[in-house]
Image (cartoon, rainbow, N blue to C red):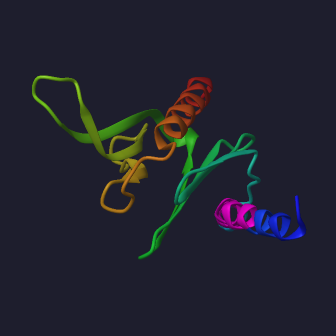
Amino acid sequence: MNTGTMILSAFFIAICALPFILSSRGSRKRKNTLLKSLETLADKHDAQISIYDVGADFIIGMDNIKNLVFFFKKTADNSVENCVDLSDYKDCKILKFGKDLHATSSSYAIERLKLDFIPKDKSAPEQQFEFYNEAVNTQLSGEIQIINTWHELIEKKLALN
């Protein structure tokens, strides 16, 4: 192979790899930004994040010692910060809002996905963490898996209370 072909091949390989490199770098930067925001929220409550998961535009974490669950969501318009003390809640449910695509089949489109905390005190309001909203994100990207994981984790913590 001559030098010109090698240089041209290296150039085309670099051009093809560049989108993957930039995407990975942007994803890592977004994750670090969300983690710093979650840690700032935890610091306000004198807590430490023991476990966390990052979604498309949100991060959820927990302090296992204090039984606090933190949620931070950043959208183009605003940011949402929530903290739930599990000792004040008796149950946690997954709320799925959507529509049937076809009456004859079991196709279902999820429009919104939330984690709902039901308080022990009936006069206290419920807390909800919105993981997915079709109006903001056009497609799901791991939110179902994350919400299922956290639902199980929180249910186990609530059972111990």
* Relative image position of residue 160 (x, y in whole percent): 62, 24
In the picture, the quarter occupied by the C terminus is: top right
Main secondary structure found in the magenta portion: helix
Indicate the position of residue 40 as horizontal and vertical percent values.
70, 67
Q: Is residue 73 above or below residue 108?
A: below
Q: Is residue 30 magenta?
A: yes
Left or right side of 79 for 29: right
In the rendered view, tell whether residue 30 sits above or below residue 124. Answer: below
Q: Residue at x 85, y 64 (%)?
A: 6
- At a point 71% along the width and 65% down the height, the residue shown is 12
Quarter containing the N terminus: bottom right
* Figure disc tally: 0
Question: Residue 74: x percent and y percent?
Answer: 51, 67
For the record, the magenta segment spans 12-31
Locate residue 156 relative to residue 109 in the image: left or right.
right
Classify residue 32 as left or right of residue 1: left
Q: Is residue 74 visible?
A: yes
The image quarter in which residue 30 lies: bottom right
Q: Position of residue 55 (x, y in %)?
A: 56, 51
